[in-house]
Image (tube, rainbow, N blue to C red):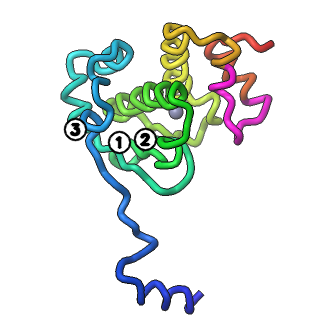
Amino acid sequence: MFRILRLFRKLPFNILGVANQKVIFMEFFKGFEKVDAVRGIFGDKTSEVLSHLTVEICWVMGYMYVDGSDGHLVISKGYLNTGDKTDIYLDLIHELCHVRQFMEGKELFDPRYDYVERPTEIEAYRYCVQEARRIGLSEERILCYLRTEWMSDYDLERLAKSVNISLP
Ligand SMILES: [Zn+2]
C-alpha cells in the first residue's frame, strides 16, 4: 500500500483524482430543451434548469445517477460511449425526473424503502416508461430496459407491476 502511495507521488498528477469532465447539460445534450418529455418535467423552466445543470462525466463504470448532495448528474463515460442509445435516452428522462425531485427537496435515496419501492423511483420509472411507450417500444423491450444486473427477478417483478408492464 505504501509503495503504491509513493508511486502516486511520483506521477505528475494525482491519478486517483483524475479530473472528471464537467459539462453543462444543455450544451452537451443538444436539443433536449425542446423534447416534450423533458418539458413535461420542468415546464417553462426547462431551458433555465438545463442551462444550469452540471453533468459530470465520470470514469467509474456504471450508468448514471443524480448526486444527492447538490443535484448534479453523474454519467459513466463508458456507458455514454457504448450503451444502447435508447436506454441512455430513457435513463436521461428518468434522471431528469430525479433532478426535479431534488429541486423540490425530496430525499432521493431514502433508505426506508427498497430501491424498487421508493416513491421517487416509481415516479421516475413511470414517467420514463410512458415515454418508452410513446416512442414505440414493445412491452418486452421495456421490461428488458427495466432489468439491471443487480436487480433480482423478484425486484424486477415488483418494479414491472408498479409501472404496469406485464410480465410474460
Ligand atoms: Zn432512479
Quadrant showing the C terminus: top right
Q: Where is mark 3, residue-wise?
A: 52
Looking at the image, do the residues carrying marks 1 and 2 touch, with CB atoms under 8 Å apart?
A: yes
**What range of the chain is rendered magenta?**
143-155
Q: Of 49 and 108, which appears nearest the observer? A: 49
**Mark whose residue sits in front, 3 or 1:** 3
Say what secondary structure mark 3 lies in.
loop
Relative placement, left or right, of 60 versus 165 is: left
| Type of amino acid under label 1 | Gly
Mark 3 to mark 1 CA distance (whole Å):
11 Å
Disc on the earlier residue, 3 or 2: 3
Q: Which residue is mark 1?
A: 71
Residue at 77 percent across and 35 percent down: it is 152
- The type of residue carrying mark 3 is His
Judge from the rendering whether residue 24 lies leftward or rightward of residue 139; answer left or right.
left
User: What residue type is disc 2 on?
Assistant: Val
Residue 144 magenta: yes
The mark nearer the N terminus, 3 or 1, is 3
**Where residue 22 sits in the image (x, y, percent)?**
31, 51
Q: How crowded is the residue under tag 2: few (<14 C-alpha within 10 Å), some, or many (20+)?
A: many
Front residue of this view, candidates 141 and 168 = 141
Q: Is residue 73 above or below residue 142?
A: below
Instruction: Reply above or below: 166 against 125.
Output: above
Q: Residue 66 — which label?
A: 2
Element marked by disc 1: loop
Q: CA distance from mark 3 to mark 2?
A: 14 Å
